[in-house]
Image (tube, rainbow, N blue to C red):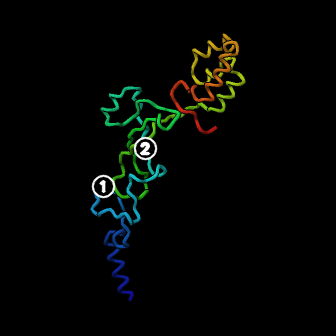
Amino acid sequence: MRLRYSVLLLVCLSWDFRICTGITVINNTTDFQQEYRPEGPLVLCKFLPKEFIECEEPIDHKGNKTAKDEKDGFGCVKFGGSWYEDVEKAKVSCTVLPYIECYGPKTFTREGVPCIKYSDHYFATTLLYSILLGFLGMDRFCLGQTGTAVGKLFSLGGVGVWWVFDVILLITGSLQPEDGSNWNPYV
């Protein structure tokens, strides 16, 4: 009995330890010899949720549709939009995070990524500025619209008319940040 274990131990030491114990490294190469089994434990890498992958930010083409077409749909012509239909979708390159096992190539293209960017513009804060200090143009300064903010400041909110008009525009969603970013959802 001891002789059998000694021989087995010598064979294991002379061989690769992973092969001897039956432990294999899964999916470290791009050589996929086996056929994909949907009922198996591995998910296709391109179907992993965003918590398990790292995607590049969409390229900002700044209104140049030709540049987007030259890059085969990678990047965004415009960012932002208040409604789902208004938001442009783009292709980005994604990579699976280390130590996540999946089937298929670890780097792939994901389509339908929304072209949305957030900055430090909060709707609730801007609305409070508009109600309380709108006659001084504070809401327009907050949104980055400096030219109209100065005009509103010197006219004291257009003698109150511009002030009320901006509050209505803000509530209806017609007054947005100047840089084209969306409202930050977290306060």
Write the residue at 43% across / 51% down.
97
Three-letter residue code for mark 2:
Cys
Crowding at dot 2, Cα within 10 Å, few <14 / some 14-19 / many 20+, comes out as: some
Q: Which residue is mark 2?
A: 55
Write the residue at 35% across / 73% down.
20
In the rendered image of this protein, does residue 70 appear above or below residue 151? below
Determine whether the residue tagged by mark 2 lies in a helix, strand or loop.
strand
**Residue 138 numbered mark, or none:** none
Q: Which residue is mark 1?
A: 30
In the rendered image of this protein, does residue 94 appear above or below residue 120? below
Write the residue at 49% across / 32% down.
80
Q: Is residue 34 left or right of residue 60?
A: left
Q: Quadrant of residue 185?
A: top right
Q: Quadrant of residue 137?
A: top right
Q: Nearer the viewer, residue 140 or 34?
A: 140
Location of residue 139 in the rendering, given as x and y in whole percent from the top left corner: 64, 23
Total number of numbered discs in the rendering? 2
From this viewpoint, which residue is outermost toward the bottom? 1
Three-letter residue code for mark 1:
Thr
